[in-house]
């Protein structure tokens, strides 16, 4: 079996997505729920784009996770769409609601987001991260796999610390 080569462009998208998730976790640790959520959305978006580019599609210029997810479903890269359709909708809301003050919020976005919303956005972002690692499999640079493991450990540590401090 011939091993597929991952292009430098795809690797760049994967690396940037990894950095976005690291930023999401760092901001989460400091209580920045809206910005943590936004960076988790960015991770999911960039992972989706990396997968689509690797599959031979042209770069899609959109932030719409529902559209990106639908493309992944249509080309057969998402087996169980129920695992991604609702998270994509949720991440769309994160993208639009976390960036700018809007009349509906009646307050600055950073005041409107909760820890639970940020945790959910991070989990959704990690799901897209894992999807990319699964689809690209052994073709993924070992450094990127190490980054994913490092991010998972960091997330577990942060959640334990945050949970511990909230119980005091």
Image (tube, rainbow, N blue to C red):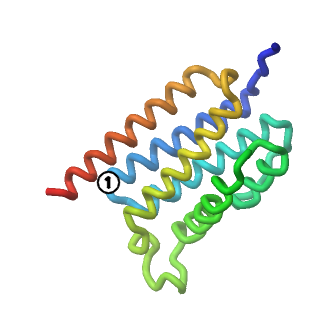
| Residue 77 x, y percent position in the rendering | 76, 42
In this picture, is 83 found above or below 115? above
Q: Judge from the rendering whether residue 145 lies leftward or rightward of residue 138; answer left or right.
A: left
Circle 1 Cα neighbour tier, 10 Å, few/some/many (<14 / 14–19 / ≥20): few
Q: Judge from the rendering whether residue 13 lies leftward or rightward of residue 103; answer left or right.
A: right
Q: Judge from the rendering whether residue 119 lies leftward or rightward of residue 76; answer left or right.
A: left
Residue plotted at (85% across, 42% down) = 57
Residue plotted at (52% across, 40% down) = 19
Residue plotted at (85% across, 44% down) = 58
Question: Quadrant location of the N terminus?
Answer: top right
Determine which quarter of the picture holds residue 99: bottom right
Q: Nearer the viewer, residue 2 or 65?
A: 2
The number of discs equals 1
**Residue with the mark numbered 1:** 30
Q: Nearer the viewer, residue 82 or 7?
A: 82
SS of the residue under disc 1:
loop
In this picture, is 153 found above or below 123? above
| Residue 22 x, y percent position in the rendering | 46, 42
């Amino acid at each position: 079996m011939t091993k597929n080569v991952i292009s430098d462009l795809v690797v760049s998208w994967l690396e940037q997505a990894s950095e976005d998730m690291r930023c999401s976790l760092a901001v989460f640790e400091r209580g920045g729920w809206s910005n943590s959520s936004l960076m988790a959305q960015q991770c999911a978006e960039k992972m989706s784009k990396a997968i689509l580019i690797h599959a031979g599609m042209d770069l899609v210029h959109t932030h719409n996770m529902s559209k990106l997810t639908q493309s992944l479903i249509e080309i057969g890269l998402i087996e169980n769409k129920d695992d991604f359709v609702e998270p994509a909708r949720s991440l769309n809301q994160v993208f639009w609601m976390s960036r700018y003050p809007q009349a509906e919020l009646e307050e600055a976005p950073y005041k409107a987001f909760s820890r639970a919303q940020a945790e959910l956005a991070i989990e959704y972002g990690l799901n897209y991260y894992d999807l990319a690692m699964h689809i690209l499999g052994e073709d993924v640079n070992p450094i990127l796999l190490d980054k994913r493991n490092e991010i998972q450990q960091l997330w577990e540590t942060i959640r334990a610390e945050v949970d511990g401090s909230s119980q005091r």
